[in-house]
Amino acid sequence: MKKTVQELLLVENKQLNHDNFKLVLQAPTKLPEIFPGQFVNIEIKKATEIFLRRPFSVLDVDYENNTFSLLVKILGRGSKVLTTYEEGEKISVVYPLGNSFTLPQKQDKVLLIGGGSGVAPMLFLAKICGLPAENVHVILGARSQQDHVNIDAYQAFGNYYFTTEDGSLGEKGFVTHHPVFTNELSTFDRVYTCGPDMMMKAVAKEAAVKGISCEVSLENMMACGFGVCLCCVEKTKEGNQCVCTEGPVFNINKLTW
Amino acid sequence: MVDLSVRIKDLVFKNPVLTASGTCGFGEEIADFVDLAMLGGVVMKGTTLKPRQGNDYPRMAETPSGMLNAVGLQNKGVDNFIQNIYPNIKDIDSNFIVNVNGSTIEEYIELTERINELDKIPAIELNISCPNVKEGGMAFGVSCPSAEAVVKAVRRVYDKPLIVKLSPNVTNIAEIAKAVEGQGADSVSLVNTFLGMAVDANSRKPVLSTITGGLSGPAIKPIALRMVWQVYQAVQIPVIGMGGIMNATDAIEFMLAGASAVQVGTAIFIDPTIPTQIVEGIDSYMEKNKMHSMSDLIGGLQM
Ligand SMILES: Cc1cc2nc3c(=O)[nH]c(=O)nc-3n(C[C@H](O)[C@H](O)[C@H](O)COP(=O)(O)O)c2cc1C
Ligand code: FES
């Protein structure tokens, strides 16, 4: 898919909870196809002290309106300023970037595990993976109830389970403490995960023990996002690879975790 | 029509805008965004004889108006370049220049000889200024005798235009420029990155795995501009200027200070269409100021 730099129109900026926003951006031309796991690199011009773009993974795509949405979690100065943009403003975006999750096969039963800013690609994947909802199981983890976002729009595409560290919603503990993970892991054909490194490593470890195919989406720091600076590398069994072009999605077989 | 072409020895660049080494891959990586034939030249990622993995992650830190990198010349080596990259770029109508690196003089010579066999590589940029490798690299570029020794050795095996890329991490960059000119360099390009450092106050650790790295971007522009001006006054050969160029005005400033051509580096990370925008910007500046050829602009600083 051809990458471009474009000025996109911010058509929606909606606060979802205390630190999560949904941003919808509209392209002036026909939107290229975008797959779960792919990301866009956004210039945050409003804050002159922010020099590099910031990468965000895509939450959803609407080809009819040439829009895609992002789930922006405030993590630092860049994401914070991005959430202050107003509807009607233009934002420069380099997209679509990176590879995407391997889509499951027709009979597969899949487990999707998201945490923090990694929730977006999991919801996107649940929606378009093409499986009947009963074969799509999604565990979403957060610190507390107030950190979870409303996923009503995605209910139809899978079975959702929540964990919180303080027990205020769903199971108490980390995603890897949820019974669907601890008891039923071996019933799944594929596991997909995106979120904090610690979480993905814990998921990957168990999946590897059970011999289940597992893909993770990495969030290494990036400068360019399209494979020229070689700053975003991850050590793999085939040497250093760029997360922005060879990833962000990697099968755990390939990683040295 | 304005004539934007410039020359280094007998090599013609259709315009004075090149992409800087390490910031545009081998050109192919930015071909989605720009027509490479619109560029005066593409200086490709630093190449070495043997493949290199580069330094450990993290290799990058964002800094005020710039960034630090410590990539450490990650590349797949010259054999891979010749087999897998050269065939794809050799017919593109622009000057594709190889950035040549080595940890010993012998390595520089051997690599140059390999590149010399490639008809469609019209010039090399000898990198004696990489701050991110343990052996060679910048060590060659920070003293006159070692810079002279590499250039002399490479000059003996290479007849095409030889550009030498200088380090700004020196007391007197004009002296180094004069030294390499004396050994037959056809041009000098400057600057490579400035040695810098970033610390994370929370973890109390260095941000980069290598502790220090190379600073690039607008943060270095005034120093780079000063160095280009000093070198321009010291040598007769064409100077290629770079360091923090983000737009046509920046590029024009470097040319007024004496640069015959410019390279655009870190700006590409922000927007890969900046180099071609700069070509257009220089064209309209020349037209507006009734300049007809690049000699009207180069070194045109009014005192
Ligand atoms: C990520 C990165 C990688 C680089 N790699 C190389 C390299 O391989 N060889 C080289 O001569 N210069 C390398 N440079 C230096 C640039 O070519 C250029 O000299 C420097 O960045 C200053 O220009 P700028 O401020 O426009 O980026 C690199 C710079 C960056 C930021
Ligand atoms: S972010 Fe530049 S190569 Fe990946």
Image (cartoon, grey):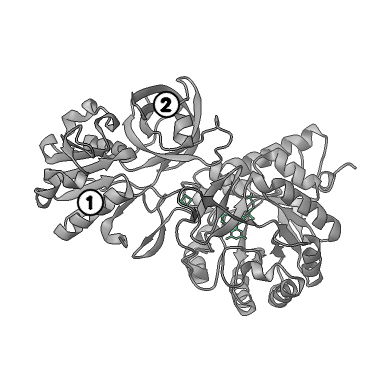
Q: Residue furthest bottom?
A: B106
**Element under label 2?**
strand
Asked if residue B244 shows in the view, the reply is no
Figure check: B239 above or below A51: below
Residue drawn 27% across the image and 37% down it:
A143
Q: Which subunit holds the residue at mark 2?
A: A
- Give the residue number, with chain letter if any, for mark 1: A203
Q: Which subunit holds the residue at mark 1?
A: A
**Element under label 1?**
helix
- Give the residue number, with chain letter if any, for mark 2: A26
CB atoms of marks 1 and 2 within 8 Å: no
Nearest the viewer among B142 and A141 is: A141
Q: Residues within 10 Å of mark 2 (few under 14, many from 20)?
A: many
* Badge 1 or badge 2: first in the primary sequence: 2
Q: Is mark 1 within 8 Å of ligand 2?
A: no
Nearest the viewer among B78 and A252 is: A252
Residue drawn 68% across the image and 48% down it:
B220
Decide if residue A35 is on the left or right side of residue A110.
right
Residue drawn 48% across the image and 36% down it:
A78
Labels 1 and 2 within one chain: yes
Choose mark 1 or mark 2, whichever is in front: 1
Figure check: B130 above or below B219: below
Q: Dividing the picture into quarters, in which one does residue B140 lie? A: bottom right
Decide if residue B50 is on the left or right side of residue A202.
right
Point out the image quarter for the C terminus of chain A. Answer: bottom left
Query: What percent of the width, then of the height, locates residue B61?
Result: 52, 50
Asked if residue B72 shows in the view, the reply is yes
Q: Amino acid at mark 2?
A: Gln
Query: What percent of the width, then of the height, locates residue B254?
Result: 75, 47
Figure check: B92 above or below A43: below
Point out the image quarter for the N terminus of chain A. Answer: top left
